[in-house]
Image (cartoon, grey):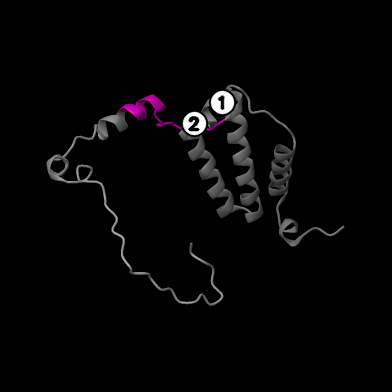
Amino acid sequence: MKIPAALSKMSIFEMVLFIGFILYIVLPIRTPVFLAPYIDSIFGMVVLFCITISLFVYTNPVLGVLYILVAYEVMRRSSSNKGNTKAIIMEYTPSQATKDVSMHNMNPAIEKTVEEEVIEVRAPIGKSHPTEYIETSFKPVADKLMDGASMV
């Protein structure tokens, strides 16, 4: 069995880390309860980020890429230990009632403007005599339809 070139250049320490990372990803190993709050904090995320950068700089890049998956799993498993399935995220979404109150304050009731009041008083719409139709001898002429549909 041939070993890929990237793995054959690894030292013993790097091989042990590689196997440990693979086992951690594959097996359902839980994060210890006493470590979960530290890993799930900002400080823990910064430490995981620093470890990732150092693995990319000082070891084989395959370990760095694999550690990104390990760091994701560590954060996911440590957040589920606290009973919280999401990472720590501050939610600023207000309730619907709060949004309704703020929207009502931003959009007050519509009042009639001066123009609308003047038009209501002076416009003849609705106050004029009923329309009277006049009989004339005029008959409109329409051209023949050429493969068109009738509009009526």
Query: As shown in the figure, which amino acid type bears the numbered disc 2?
Result: Ile
Instruction: Please give left or right for residue 105 compared with residue 65 in the image.
Output: left
Numbered circle sitting on residue 88 = 2
Q: Is 28 drawn above or below residue 34 in the view shown?
A: below
User: Are circles 2 and 1 on residues that touch, CB within 8 Å?
Assistant: yes
Instruction: Please give left or right for residue 133 compared with residue 61 in the image.
Output: left
- Residue 37, percent from left and from top: 53, 26
Does the stretch in magenta take in 37?
A: no
Numbered circle sitting on residue 107 = none
- Which secondary structure type mostly characterizes the magenta part of the structure? loop
Quadrant location, the N terminus: bottom right
| Range drawn in magenta | 86-101
- Residue 122, percent from left and from top: 12, 44
Query: What residue do we see at 35% from left, 26% from top?
Result: 98
Callout 1: helix, strand or loop?
Answer: loop
Mark 2 → mark 1, Cα distance in angstroms? 8 Å
Numbered circle sitting on residue 84 = 1
Query: As shown in the figure, which amino acid type bears the numbered disc 1?
Result: Asn
Classed neighbour count for the residue bearing mark 1: other residues with Cα under 10 Å, few (<14), some (14–19), many (≥20)? few
Query: What residue do we see at 70% from left, 37% from top?
Result: 24
Q: Is 36 drawn above or below residue 137 in the view shown?
A: above
